[in-house]
Amino acid sequence: MQEAKRSPLLDSLKIVGLAIMACYVCRFWPMVIFLVIYGLAVITRTLVKSRKAKTAKLVPVIPAEPIPAPTPTQRDMENLAFSMICGRITELVARDYPNARWVWEFPTAQKLILEGHEAYILLNQAGGYRRAQVLYQNLQVTGLKYEGITVAPTQQPTEPSPEETEPDNYSLLAFQWVDAHTADLSAQREEARQNGLDHVLVPETELPVAQSWQDICAELARAGFRTQVLAEGIKITGVDENERRSE
């Protein structure tokens, strides 16, 4: 059986009452007066404590306010939209040409798209197509418009001349690529020079089709770069002609 809860006040009053009765029987009046005063003090103290306990229980608990999440900035939204555009372009290129690789024609592609201008990508191993326009609306890619010459012969060709053996001229592509990357290549070369290196390697992944590398080297030479074609890309070495003339 569970024992009933006992009140400390009742226990104290019983003890005080028994002490008063004993003193009364013994005619010990001073002690009787003292015990009466003590009993009143115990009752008053117990009532005050019980009232404070009830007041504390009634105080509502205010939950802590959650820390608000940081608000994304306009720059964050633009970077997210551009990354989604790049991912969509990769999906479309992989769907049409699984072995193809692509790079932006201009390094300022994000700015061009945000301002609503036309944007193009350069392709490698895409079945003859070397360039494609990115079709987009409301920062969402709707498709790619491939550009290139892939004309099949309609009649039996005669003995081809040296010009006819090359169906495409890569000089325009080389000029456009060098014009878009000259500043970046100069900065890379200066950084390599500060790090004690004597060359900069432009990897295959950042270049258009391999057939255009010789034309790119020719354009780079006109811009003052000393170049060398390697299997893995184009190597830029030494100082440019403008610096040599200034010296």
Image (cartoon, grey):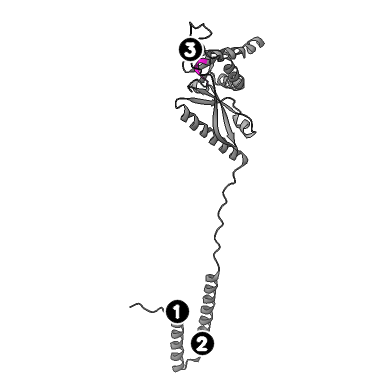
- Circle 2: is it few (<14), some (14-19), or many (20+) Cα within 10 Å? some
- Identity of the residue drawn at 52% across and 9% down: 164
Q: Nearer the viewer, mark 1 or mark 2?
A: 1
Q: Amino acid at mark 3?
A: Gln
- Circle 1: is it few (<14), some (14-19), or many (20+) Cα within 10 Å? few
Q: Nearer the viewer, mark 3 or mark 2?
A: 3
As rendered, which of 144 and 22 lies closer to the eye? 144
Is residue 10 found left or right of 227 in the rendered image? left
Mark 3 and mark 1 in contact? Answer it, CB < 8 Å.
no
As rendered, which of 132 and 10 lies closer to the eye? 132
Secondary structure under the numbered disc 2 in the rendered image: helix
Q: Which residue is mark 3?
A: 155
Q: Position of residue 33 (x, y in %)?
A: 52, 88
Q: Amino acid at mark 2?
A: Val
Q: Which residue is mark 1?
A: 8
Is residue 70 found left or right of 18 in the rendered image? right
Magenta residues, start to end: 207-211
Secondary structure under the numbered disc 1 in the rendered image: helix
Q: Which residue is mark 2?
A: 36
Numbered disc total: 3
Q: Position of residue 85 (x, y in %)?
A: 55, 34
Q: Position of residue 98 (x, y in %)?
A: 45, 27
Disc on the earlier residue, 3 or 2: 2
